[in-house]
Image (spheres, grey):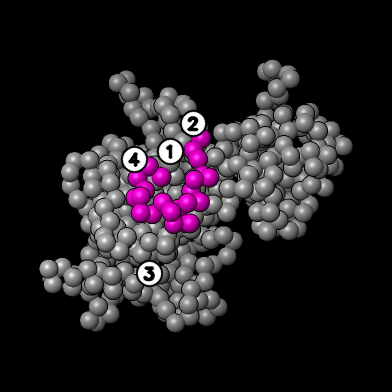
Amino acid sequence: MTIGGFVSAANLSCQSTLTGNQTLGCGFLNNSVKTNALAFGGCESMGHSLRIPHTKAIRLRPRKGVSPLQTIILQIIAGLAGLSTAKYLADAGHKPILLESRDVLGGKVAAWKDDDGDWYETGLHIFFGAYPNVQNLFGELGIDDRLQWKEHSMIFAMPNKPGEFSRFDFPEVLPAPLNGIWAILKNNEMLTWPDKVKFAIGLLPAMLGGQAYVEAQDGLTVKEWMRKQGVPDRVTDEVFVAMSKALNFINPDELSMQCILIALNRFLQEKNGSKMAFLDGNPPERLCMPIVDHIQSLGGEVRLNSRIQKIELNNDGTVKSFLLNNGNMIEGDAYVFATPVDILKLLLPENWKEIPYFQRLKKLVGVPVINVHIWSVYKTVPDCEPCRPLQRSPIEGFYLAGDYTKQKYLASMEGAVLSGKLCAQAIVQDYELLIARGQTRLAQASVY
């Protein structure tokens, strides 16, 4: 397989199809009498298991008389979305070859070593307790001990009092949401009692209405939503500027309130949702390499310095191959792009640009994130939610992964990992279709 910015070719000789009453848990079958869902162990897919037709089933061997897929290509930046896609496809029996455009793993969590042996990273990467898919990934790789959990507090610098800080402390003895309510009530430096009451009244619909209410607020910026609730601009400036910058690198007058509500909902409804951890070293070595080792242990490959130049199409508009900058052509039975959305738009074939699925990507633009180099994440401004694409594209055999694709965690490490799981799910579900497509291609080649 090839995953965007990072290409991967997978041998699918040990593949999966779907039948009722079975679920796929990270590469192994679990019998279940309660659901017909295809679910990777412990992950949340938009809050519930993805439903698939009852008549299909997951199998770890190809049917007699059905040739296995030989190659899946994933053009990817070797970030968490691409690595996650490849990891879960390898777990399902595929053997991906990942082609990364640069000489370093990680994408937005990449890091580089200088001549003195010191590491510099793309930014501060925080792992929250409300990241179940990331924590599952660490557990599956056996590297849980690499997350260093801190005390359960959120500490803000006070803009009007330089050098002073305000704390929101979450007591361990209380369950959610009481621990979060206690943290808010005990803070008097940044929130007055009238502020707390207005903010609490505004949050009640989010807590009671759940995801439906949260998504309905996508049309409002943070500042607009706060003013609608009667929360003074002072609170927005002192509390939510920092939170908006942390979540999407933009200000409250630009950020969609949906983004803030998603974070607050998880923080208030899960006891350790807002608890933070840091990786015990640089991400390429301490997180990405264990994923690569896992993929390689299952027969996959990882190749660096392999940048895609062009997506070549068949006459019917499907992908024929990826042309790399070194002149090599990479062909496969399925293709996945897991790059930032701006890279995808640059490489999108002209024939695809008028398809509504891809047209909606125009609204998704990157935010330049500057540390010691420039990177980008998609800008979570109002009314972007309808433009976020599902992982399965309308082009047969072409898929997307990345934190900008449809999943409930938005632009985050958790969103990237979850998007990879959902992308792998879609490919596993489409196995028979991809097998048939591969056979047709072979038949046409033999004719010519």
Q: Could you tell which of marks 4 and 3 lies nearer the N-terminus? A: 4
What amino acid type is highlighted by mark number 1?
Answer: Lys
- Magenta residues, as a range? 345-368
What amino acid type is highlighted by mark number 3?
Answer: Asp
Q: Residue at x 43, y 54 (%)?
A: 354
Front-lying residue, 440 or 404 = 440
Residue 204 is situated, as x and y percent measured from the top left of the image, at 78, 52
**What residue did someone put label 1 on?**
108
| Numbered disc in front, either 2 or 4 | 2
Position of 131 with respect to 59 (left or right) is: right
**What residue did someone put label 2 on?**
369
> Is-magenta flag for residue 350?
yes
Residue 430 image label: 3
Front-lying residue, 137 or 302 = 302
**What residue did someone put label 4 on?**
105
Q: Could you tell which of marks 2 and 1 lies nearer the N-terminus? A: 1
| Residue most extreme to the right | 194
The residues tagged by marks 4 and 3 sit, at their Cα atoms, a distance apart of 28 Å
Q: Could you tell which of marks 3 and 2 lies nearer the N-terminus? A: 2
* Mark 2 touches mark 1? (CB < 8 Å): yes
Q: Residue at x 67, y 35 (%)?
A: 252
Decide: few, some or many residues near mark 2? Use Cα within 10 Å; few <14, some 14-19, many ≥20.
some
Q: Residue at x 40, y 76 (%)?
A: 18
